[in-house]
């Protein structure tokens, strides 16, 4: 897993914790991960390095 600074973790953890409380089955988790990956590609573009980053 790529390293991120503790300050970034402190900002992201409450968002992740809140989202984690919302899903109750694997399908929802899959959907969330897929949407995050899709949004990453939309933001940065369709390049091999960016596809690789989401994997």
Image: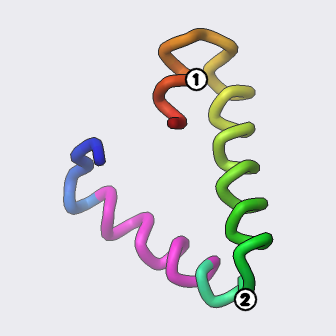
Secondary structure beneath disc 1?
Answer: helix
Answer whether residue 51 is magenta in the image.
no
Residue at 58% x, 23% y: name it.
51
Residue 23 falls left or right of residue 14: right
- Kindly indicate the quadrant of the structure image that contains residue 43: top right
Q: Return the x and y of residue 53 as percentages of the image width and height.
A: 47, 29
Specify start and end residues of the magenta stretch as a single range: 8-19
* Mark 1 in CB contact with mark 2 (< 8 angstroms): no
Residue 28 falls left or right of residue 50: right
Q: Return the x and y of residue 41 as percentages of the image width and height.
A: 67, 27
Number of dots carrying numbers: 2
Residue at 32% x, 69% y: name it.
10
Mark 2 nearby-residue class (10 Å; few <14, some 14–19, many ≥20): few
The front one of 28 and 8 is: 28
Q: Mark 2 points at which residue?
A: 24
Residue at 53% x, 36% y: name it.
54
Residue 22 falls left or right of residue 10: right
Residue at 72% x, 88% y: name it.
24
Whether residue 53 is situated above or below residue 32 in the rendered picture: above
Whether residue 29 is situated above or below residue 48 in the rendered picture: below
Mark 1 nearby-residue class (10 Å; few <14, some 14–19, many ≥20): some
Secondary structure beneath disc 2?
Answer: loop
């Amino acid at each position: 897993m790529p390293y991120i600074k503790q300050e970034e973790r402190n900002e992201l953890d409450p968002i992740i914790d809140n989202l984690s409380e919302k899903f109750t089955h694997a399908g929802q988790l899959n959907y969330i991960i897929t949407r995050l990956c899709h949004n990453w590609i939309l933001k940065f573009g369709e390049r091999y390095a960016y596809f690789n980053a989401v994997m």
